[in-house]
Image: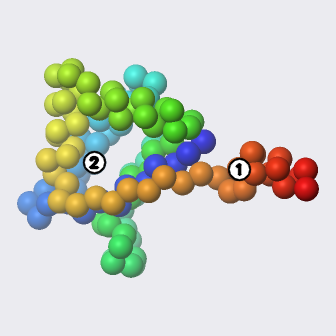
Amino acid sequence: MNLYHCFIELKRDTKALAFAQALEAWMTHLKEAGKIGSWRLLRRKMALSSDSHGDFMLEIEVTDLAALDQAFRHVSSQSIEVAELFNAVHQMIAESRAGLYRPFPDPERAERVALI
């Protein structure tokens, strides 16, 4: 399992609930297409965060890097439905920063350490 995190700032005129609704439609599509696992959207509470964190954090679970690559390929497909869902979300975003995380220690590392 890998966790793809996006820290998101919305454009000034964007309504947070409209963003959440568009994101839910987009993530539901990706999940139903088998491109991602679970996901969740979180919002910063009481402005408690560093400057490098966004107002929103999107967390997407994928099984491995191959699954993440397949999700990105799906996004870049020529499907009108995919483009509409993607654009509905991304037209509301002013800035985003992403990172990919994995459980630690991961099973492969734990096995190597056990052999030492």
Pointer 1 or 2: first along the chain: 2
Give the image location of residue 97, x and y in percent. Answer: 33, 60
Display colour scheme: rainbow
Relative horizontal placement of residue 4, taking residue 13 as reference (left or right) = right
Task: Please give the label number shown on residue 106.
Answer: 1
Which residue is drawn at the image coordinates 33% and 78% (left, top)? Answer: 51
Q: Nearer the viewer, residue 105 or 113?
A: 113
Closer to the observer: label 1 or label 2? 1
Q: What amino acid is at disc 1?
A: Asp
> Which residue is label 2 attached to?
20
Label 1 crowd (10 A; few <14 / some 14-19 / many >=20): few
Which residue is drawn at the image coordinates 75% and 51% (left, top)? Answer: 109
Relative horizontal placement of residue 83, taking residue 7 as reference (left or right) = left
Q: Is residue 29 above or below residue 54?
A: above
Which residue is drawn at the image coordinates 16% and 22% (left, top)? Answer: 80
Q: If the image is split into quadrants, where does the N terminus sit?
A: top right
Q: Give the SS element for disc 2.
A: helix
Give the image location of residue 85, x and y in percent. Answer: 22, 33
